Structures are given as C-alpha cells and as structure tokens.
Amino acid sequence: MRVLIVDDSSVMRKIVERSLRQAELAITKVFEAGNGSDALETLKREKVDLILSDISMPIMDGLEFVKQVAEQGIAPGVPIVMITTEGSESHVMRAIACGARGYIRKPFTPEQVKEHVAPLVAVQA
Amino acid sequence: MSGPPVTISQQDWTMHLAESAREVFETMLGSSIELQGAVASPTEVTAVVGLAGVLSGNFMVRCSQRGLEKMGECMLGGPVSQAEAIDAMGEVCNMLAGSWKRRITELADGCMLSVPTVVIGSSYQVHSPDSQNLMEQQFIFGGEAVSIQLQVQK
C-alpha cells in the first residue's frame, strides 16, 4: 500500500508511519508533505492508496486540501483520513463534509490507527 | 466562531490538564508522569500554542534542555537531533492543548489553536497583552520537571 502522510511536523509524520507499520497495514511506499499545497503536487505525480492528513498546517490546511482533492479530481476514490488535535464534533463533521472518510484524534495509538484505516483500505482492495 | 467569553476555573484547569497530560505522555511518549506542587519553573525551553475565540491566551509547556531531548527521544524511540526535539515538543504542546480543550464543552468548538512555536534560551519571560492570570501545573517526566501554563487574556 502506498501512503501519503501530510503534516507540518516531520516528527508526527514519522510517528504516523510507524503507527501504520505497527498496525501491520502492508505499507510499501510512504510519501510525505508538510502542507496541503505540497500534498496536492505529490498527488499529481504519484499514485497512492491512502492519505492521512493533519488539519492545522501553514500554506494550505487539511480541510482545504481535502476540498481541493475533490474539486480537482485528484486521487479519485482514495480514502483520506484526518489525524489532528482539533477533535470536536463540528471539526469532524466539517472534515467529513469536505470529503474525509475518517478522523483520528491526537494523541493516538497504533491500534486506533488500524481501527480507522483498515476498513477503508480493505474496501478498496 | 463566536459566543460569550469563557472563564476557566482552577478546578477545570487542574483536573482536565492532569488527565490530558497523562493521556499525551502515556500514549505518545510511552511515559508516566508524576504531578507535583509548585517549584521553580524550568525556563530553558518554552513551547507556545495560542488560543483564540471564547477563550484567548497562550497555552505553554516549559522544560529544561534535557527535558526537551527526552521528549524527542521518547516520541521517536531513539536519539534525536535538536531540530527533531524541538518539533516533538511543539507537537506535545499542541496535543496537550487540544486534549485539554476537548474536555471543556464550551471550548471544544469555540476556541481554536494556533500552530506551536518553540522558544529556546535563558533569562526570558513570556507576556501577553492584558493577561488576566497564569495557571500552572507542574509534573515530573523522566526525572525532568515540566511546567504547563495557561495565560488567559482579560
């Protein structure tokens, strides 16, 4: 599975990757981006099977990124899961309304990542 | 985002912050913490997340250089560069603020967080305009003192 991880923190990107591998999700390639704009550029060049994105990022935040993925028709059908500290119900609903298929609140365990991600990639397969 | 300003009681602060600190440090750093009473705050490193909305102010985490390094090492599971340690501490501050905010109903939707900023040095103080009060909780993490502070604007 090819994954794009979008977060302005390089430490958090490493932790998300580690959690995906600990969740035994058969990761074959990881792409990283520090903001939504860079993530869009990556998606125009590379095919991925899963996207995990923070919300609060400079240049382009996660909600705008998800909206742009849908509006530009990039990565059709690829599930996007938000991983973020902003975890209120209204934030979750806004993320889903923008096109996200899941939402994980920080802090998180590998088990929580697996619980949210595994059903989405299993459906794809 | 609008609504009447929210007042945070010492009880709200202390109780919810202790829960948040345990959640963040145990989940993401794999480390327990010990709450402790007021002692001199460590001041070598300060991470700041701004709060805006029904509550405005600064949420800060302060520790020593060694505490900073420990946070990075615990989050990444090994030796880290100074840049990685700073990044890790910013994320710890971000997660603490977010976890604490979520536990207070009035803040969950009514208060936004800024991206974290980390300041390193000595002999500095952090001031915000019209700060009303400073609430502080300290704990021990891996043998190092950590202080979490909330400065609320009037």
Image (tube, grey):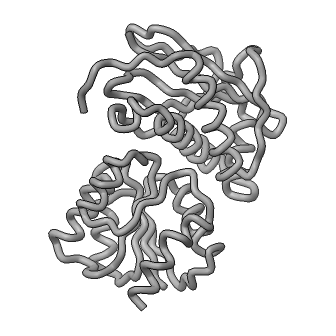
Residue depicted at x 31% and y 52%: A61
Residue A33 visible here: no
Check the image and report above or below for A26 versus B79: below
Residue depicted at x 38% and y 81%: A48
Query: Quarter holding the C terminus of chain A?
Result: bottom left
Left or right? Give the position of A20 relative to B72. Answer: left
Relative depth, front residue between B142 and B84: B142
Residue A76 occupies quadrant? bottom left
Residue B122 occupies quadrant? top right
Residue extending farthest bottom: A125
Image location of residue B100, percent across then percent down: 53, 35
Residue A23 occupies quadrant? bottom right
Image location of residue B125, percent across then percent down: 56, 14
Image location of residue B20, percent across then percent down: 61, 38
Residue depicted at x 71% and y 48%: B26
Left or right? Give the position of A98 relative to B117. Answer: left
Left or right? Give the position of B136 relative to A119. Answer: right
Residue A101 visible here: yes
Check the image and report above or below for A24 versus B49: below
Check the image and report above or below for A76 versus B85: below
Image location of residue B152, percent across then percent down: 45, 16
Residue depicted at x 49% and y 69%: A116
